[in-house]
Image (tube, grey):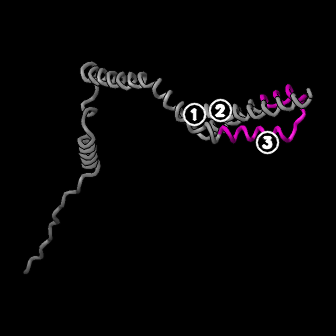
């Protein structure tokens, strides 16, 4: 009777671990939505997550069943993952996103406002206290015209057009 009870606990704990592993993976997915990562770092995060998960699952296997792997463990574990995927995943991810956006909304607002204030102050300081050449404040069109004019001026200095020299013709006198 004790053996059957232990196998029942093993089945339920493997079902629960499948559910928990996907629940924790969704935390990682929500984190990625707010802080985008390059492919390499996503792969690295996944590798670390699944290595830690496998260590925890094997620890559970050794505690519950003395390290003996049973086929019903695999079915229960996969069914726990599947049940989380179908029952909870979408609602959890949406709720977590809304909660994080709600939690950080005041900080995002303050950050946007402080950026505007800092830009305004720097613009005023830049205008009155920092010496810059005149061409710095020209807009793009004026800067392009100045550049074109300077190019033409330097071209004239370096490559002046030769003046036409009239050749004197020796006229033949009729005698």
How far apart, in angstroms, are the residues tagged by discs 1 and 2? 9 Å
Asked if residue 77 is among those painted magenta in the image, a careful observer would answer yes
Label 1 with label 3: CB-CB less than 8 Å: no
- Give whichever of discs 1 and 2 has the lower sequence position: 2
- Judging from the image, what secondary structure is the residue with disc 3 in? helix
Label 1 with label 2: CB-CB less than 8 Å: yes
For residue 23, which numbered disc appears in the image?
Answer: 2
Label 2 crowd bin: few (<14), some (14–19), many (20+), radius 10 Å: some
On the rendered structure, is 88 left or right of 79? Answer: left
> Which is more toward the observer, 103 or 89?
89
> Which residue is drawn at the image coordinates 41% and 22% (left, top)?
106
Label 3 crowd bin: few (<14), some (14–19), many (20+), radius 10 Å: some
Residue 5 visible at all? yes
How far apart, in angstroms, are the residues tagged by discs 2 and 3? 18 Å
> Which is more toward the observer, 52 or 160?
52
On the rendered structure, is 66 left or right of 113? Answer: right
Judge depth for marks 2 and 3 and give the one in front: 3
């Amino acid at each position: 009777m004790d053996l059957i009870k232990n196998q029942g606990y093993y089945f339920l704990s493997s079902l629960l671990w499948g559910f928990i592993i996907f629940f924790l993976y969704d935390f990682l997915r929500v984190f990625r939505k707010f802080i985008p990562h390059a492919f390499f770092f996503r792969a690295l995060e996944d590798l670390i997550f699944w290595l830690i998960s496998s260590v925890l699952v094997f620890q559970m296997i050794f505690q519950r069943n003395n390290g003996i792997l049973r086929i019903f463990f695999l079915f229960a574990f996969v069914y726990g993952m599947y049940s989380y995927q179908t029952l909870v995943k979408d609602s959890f991810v949406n709720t977590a996103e809304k909660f994080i956006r709600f939690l950080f909304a005041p900080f995002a607002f303050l950050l946007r406002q402080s950026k505007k204030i800092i830009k305004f102050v720097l613009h005023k300081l830049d205008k009155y206290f920092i010496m810059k050449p005149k061409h710095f404040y020209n807009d793009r069109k004026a800067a392009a015209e100045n550049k074109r004019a300077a190019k033409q001026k330097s071209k004239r200095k370096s490559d002046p057009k030769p003046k036409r020299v009239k050749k004197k013709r020796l006229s033949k006198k009729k005698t």
